[in-house]
Image: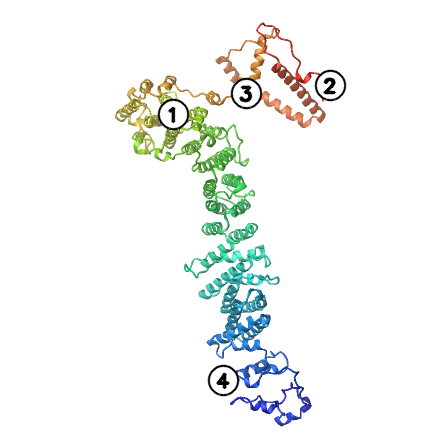
Amino acid sequence: MLGALPSFPSLPRGVSMPGLLSSLPRGINPPSLPRGITMPSLPTLPSFPSLPRGVTLPRVVAMPTVPEAPRRLLQDCCSVFDHQTDGGLCGCCWALRPRYKRLVDNIFPEDPEDGLVKANMEKLTFFALSAPEKLDRIAAYLSERLTRELNRHRYGYVCIAMEALEQLLLACHCQSINLLVESFLSTLRLLLEADKPHLHILATNSFVKFANIEEDTPSYHRSYDFFVSRFSEMCHSDDEDTDTQIKIRVSGIRGLQGVVRKTVDDELQVNIWEPRHMEQIVPALLVNLQLHTHSNSSSPAEHTEVCFRELLGRAAYGHINNAIRPVLMHLDSRSLWEGRGFAVRCFQIIMYSIQSQHSHLVIQQLLGHLDANSRSPASVRAGIVEVLSEAAVIEATDSVGPTVLEVFNTLLRQLRQSVDYQLTGYHDNAGKRKTNSREEKTLQDTVIRTIGAFANTLPVYQRSEVMLFIMGKIPVPGIYPALGSPNAGFEGSRMIQVMLLKSLLQVSERYESSNLLTALPSSFLEPLLSFTLMEDPEIRLLVLSILISLIDRRHNAARLATASVTFDVSVLELKDDRCSRQDNLFMRKHAQRLYRHVYLACREESCGRSHYQALFTLLAVLGVELANEEVLVDLIRLVLALQEVALNTQEPLSAFNRCGVHAVCAAFLLLLSQLGPPPPLHQHVTQVIESRQKEAPHLLPEDALRDKPRLPKGERKVDEACLFVQSEICEALAGSNYSAHSERLSTPYTPQPADEDRLSRRKSIGDAVSLQVDMDLQYSCDAPQKPATELITFQTLKNAIEDRGAVEEEERRKRMEVVERFQTAPFEEIAAQCGGRTSLLQSKLDQVFDLMIRPPPSPSGQSPPRSTPLHEMKFPDLCVY
């Protein structure tokens, strides 16, 4: 029986077992021995070897006081029973354990409700700072104690262990913190894997404290994948208890915020911007961003917004797309585009949070997503476009960069597709998904507003380019081909014209340019004015509105929006400055074109009240912005010509049209007479208006241009006293600065198409060559006489018109022959034919150059000898170097 006893370590010299046991404090009994072993049998054991020189065991007399001894002995026994000793039976004796374990054990109180023993925690912290090489052992033992208490469901001691780990983390230097982190993170994993919500919250709070610690020493072996996944899962908590659910979700959000802070600025850590992480983090945040049940600062929505802003604010250029793509996917999967409110709020947070120079990347993502959803329902497309509109308002002025035309091209393409869907009734090519006109109309209005919002963020020079770009997309009769799908037809082209003109109006409303030559170049003005001759009244009204917004640089149009004969310039406070040199050049170049289209627009029978109001506003803005002496006289001539149109019975105008033209003339002349002309002109205009108020009030805007116009029954002849007389206007302008141009009033204004060409015609090189050719032929003796010019009569023009159909048919036949020849003829034949034409062209050019270098004829009538051209002269060899 004795031979089966275990071996015991040797005791110090001079110390026996009975003496050791007798030295125990009062009330402490030695542990019981196994059955069959008695104390007297101990001396028969072999002698124990002595310790090496200089090595001593802790003094037995240094035992703690009596109250702590039972607890220490109980802990030692528990260690033995749990098989947690390092080896041998020394672990059962508290005095023989390593110091760091004793210091760790001392921080745990007898009752966990008492909390951490602060005095002993200070000793443990001092020991850890004094011996930083033992930090890993301390952390491992703390983790071991926490795991043991967790398995026993003693959650009070778990909290104490976590608090101790946190204090050690905060107290340690940056160089030695890596020794603690691995054990700390493994402990957090245990707590997060438990099924107790309060442990999840405890682990999250500890992780947030750890995330706020700035580290200088890099770590190459950490992984936060588990924490990203677990915190994201906590954000989706659906606990039955509402308060618990909110707490878990808030903890998950705070945990994700800690992961972002810990990893986003450290290149050696896991790349949090990878799609696999962003696809977990972003949806978890957006789910909680939708919660509005709690408006206080502890609600998930408030915490989510803070975390989302911090995440986006730290995003670099290459990470924006990975952060935005999950947002688009989440809005698609949850059908949140149709509600619009949440989607707009999301992208407002995004645009305000990211760096301003990266804003165009968000716009590009939205544009690409809009193209990808081109066959989605109209409500989805409208939601995306509205988000684009809101994002454009927030975006910095110069951040769109090189994608300006791409933005507008995408939006205009959506307009054309919406028109096609509206006409066909389906928003896909297969004809399976129906749509309705109301939804498509809503989408079109949203796209138009978005175009205006984008244009308002651009500098002036880019807005001009955008207007030219939009004008190039509008189907203009005779200039640009019709756009849209082939099945759209005439109605589709008309709808596209209306939509694009509305877009152009949105851009022009806030366009401010001091130089009208750049604001209204010929390439833009000519196609725009061509729309004033179209039959569609809506298109004509849009064109007039665009012209008003571009010419009205001093914002006087709002005060002149309604025609009236009670205008007082002193009360209106109009802003009129002296015309600049650029304004005078613009009027010299384009004035006749503007007058002509105003004149022709007034002759349209389909004009309504809004058209006449817009015509008046356009004339008034021209008079205020650009009127000098010459322009004012031309405007008076135009008004007199319009008055003649209203009086002409051969014009196909209704009574309303005639009264509307008279009303526009009266209101505009009254305003014009107060802008600088001599007082007699104002007196004449006032007399005519007073006569109309008495005898013909239907010729004034107050009656003719109201919602329900008061018109006379039947045709009524206008009295001479109610008309503006050209001779009296000339007399009124005599003796003033306008007298030099008043003679032009005697010539009635007649719009001619040649006026537009005459103002911008320039002599070309071809004109000079043809002039020299004519002079040469005139002085040449042997030149044949020029045939007499054919006299063009009315009958000649009539015959030409009648034969026009045959001529067009012949031209079409010739074109078809040319196309067929190039399609079927062999290459050698085509090359030979083209070579013959090239030779013919070269011979003609030689003749032209020969005539150009020929010297002029001499006064004697004898032609001088022809000099040899320089390129044909032959020089001696000695002159060639």
Q: CA distance from mark 1 to mark 4?
A: 110 Å
Q: Is residue 637 left or right of residue 874?
A: left
Residue placed most toward the observer, 224 or 860: 860
> Which residue position holds label 2?
878
The kind of secondary structure element at disc 2 is: helix
Above or below, 784 relative to 278: above
The quarter of the picture where residue 588 lies is top left
Pointer 4 or 3: first along the chain: 4
Pointer 1 or 3: first along the chain: 1
Residue placed most toward the observer, 467 or 113: 113
Kind of residue at disc 2: Leu
Residue 67, numbered circle: 4
The kind of secondary structure element at disc 3 is: loop
The kind of secondary structure element at disc 1 is: loop
Look at the image and tell me in which quarter the C terminus lies.
top right
Q: Give the residue displayed 37% in from the left and 18% down from the top.
A: 740
Q: CA distance from mark 4 to mark 3?
A: 118 Å
Kind of residue at disc 4: Pro
Estimate the x, y position of residue 415 in percent, counting from the top left: 50, 40
Kind of residue at disc 1: Asn
Q: Give the residue displayed 56% in from the left and 91% down from the top.
A: 22
Q: CA distance from mark 2 to mark 4?
A: 129 Å
> Which residue position holds label 1?
628
Residue 764, numbered circle: 3
Kind of residue at disc 3: Ser
Residue 504, numbered circle: none
